[in-house]
Amino acid sequence: MRLDELGDWRRTHLSNEITPELASAEVTLMGSVVDVRDLGGIKFLILRDAGGTIQVTAPKAKTSRRILAKIDSLSKESSIAVRGKVVTAKQAPRGMEVVPTDIKLLNAAITPLPLDPTGRVKADLDTRLDSRLLDLRRPKTMAIFKIRHKVLQIVREFLVSKGFIEVNTPKIVATATESGAALFPISYFEREAFLGQSPQLYKEILTGCFDRVFEIGPIFRAEEHDTTRHLNEVTSVDIEAAFVTQEDVMRILEELIVRVFNRVKQRCAGELKVLKHDLKEPNPPFPRITYGEALKKLDDAGVKVPWGQDLPTPAERRLGELVGGTFFVVDWPTETKPFYIMPHKDDPKLCCAFDLMHEGLELASGGTRIHQEKLLIKQLRQKGLNPKRFESHLKNYRWGLPPHSGFGLGLDRLVMVLTGAKNIRECVLFPRDRRRLVP
Ligand code: ATP
Ligand code: MG
């Protein structure tokens, strides 16, 4: 099939910008072919672009043979440009349609397609992820990523308004921050390096100059889990602030979560409707239960978790049912949390750490950090880590690093909750898990 050149054609409007005020105006639209139908005297073409869809209507009696033949030649999902006149039409899906004066086929899609982008034919998630571009043209998939985009905006707006500076720290690193086992090794010239599992140590150092920092970036976890809530590459919203404790960052997190739910509900009403998701806003203050209380509640419900263990996924789910909504778990055993978390002064078996849970899903972890070198070295040793390997980090503590606190919030999980997605893979453009490395 012969393709046309884009030439000097440029889009004048997106489909959702075609409003009654534009009646009789000439417009140029660009997008993909959703469908072509022939109803005897009229040919219909549905065009999709970033604004939605619009009907292009060609009455056979008034349209040139060349344009009619062109419409016939269009396969679904081909890339096209349509120039034409805007007409009000009660029977058209949006009350407006465009009568074409010229059409360009810019790139043709092959048939048959591996996936039906209208979403009418159901496809399993693996098939959808294999042909992600077509999947992303489905209204539901598109709605998830439009919400994700808004969430990023809202989070940035909020943190900047609270005096946080956005930073970017290296993702190629020499040492572990969470636990050594979960690292992806990479070859770095003549040495071994790793993909960063958290910006933790960098953001802590940066509180010593910027006071308050945040980073929205990838973290890599080499865990062999195969769940609907874990991936091996995720996006983390990390914050760290000087001269505050876990209490202060818990309040920031609470305010952030309430703000995100509220703004998404306001600004993404159309997307939530496409997803048929009734978003329930959490009410502050979020309840707090201690780790000990959580274990007791679980035990009463017949779920045994040994003291000192992180909550496994089934226990998290059960706890979510027992407590309900959005809540904090505080007073964790020091042994379950990373070395940089501050132990309680009067009871060092417990530490100043918290998890934020939403309906049985961990959204964030945070706490007060250790800012004294001696104590940090002690905690490193207690975790079986060699302080010598942390020398380049430890020296910062000799330069008056302030007391500080922070958290890491999983963006992909937050988007799951906001969109009602049951699988984290739905909320990541090109997810990375144990079996998936492409596309
Ligand atoms: P989990 O216990 O659920 O495996 P974690 O406690 O190991 O998570 P943290 O190190 O506390 O994770 O990371 C902070 C946040 O980043 C988590 O609360 C979660 O929202 C997100 N996160 C961490 N690891 C993953 C992962 N593998 N997949 C998806 N999100 C993750
Ligand atoms: Mg955690």
Image: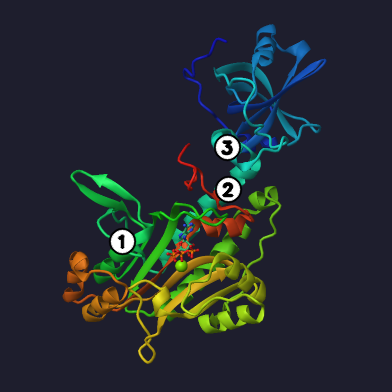
Look at the picture and state if 234 lies above or below 337: above
Q: Identify which residue is drawn at 20% across, 65% down.
A: 389
Give the mark, 3 or 2, whose residue is nearer the N terminus.
Answer: 3
Please provide percent x and percent y for residue 17: 62, 37
Residue indicated by mark 2: 426
Disc 1 residue crowd, few under 14, some 14–19, many 20+, Cα 10 Å: many
Q: Of the residues shown, which amino acid type is indicated by label 2?
A: Glu
Disc 2 residue crowd, few under 14, some 14–19, many 20+, Cα 10 Å: many
Disc 3 residue crowd, few under 14, some 14–19, many 20+, Cα 10 Å: few
Mark 3 vs mark 2: give the one in front. Answer: 2
Q: Is residue 385 left or right of residue 365?
A: left
Q: Is residue 203 left or right of residue 231?
A: left
Count of numbered circles in the view: 3
Colour basis: rainbow
Q: Is residue 56 left or right of residue 126?
A: right
Disc 1 to disc 2, how far (Cα)? 29 Å
Extreme residue in the bottom direction? 346
Residue indicated by mark 1: 176
Residue indicated by mark 3: 50
Give the mark, 1 or 3, whose residue is nearer the N terminus.
Answer: 3
Please provide percent x and percent y for residue 204: 30, 69
Q: Is residue 59 left or right of residue 101?
A: right
Disc 3 to disc 2, how far (Cα)? 19 Å
Give the mark, 1 or 2, whose residue is nearer the N terminus.
Answer: 1
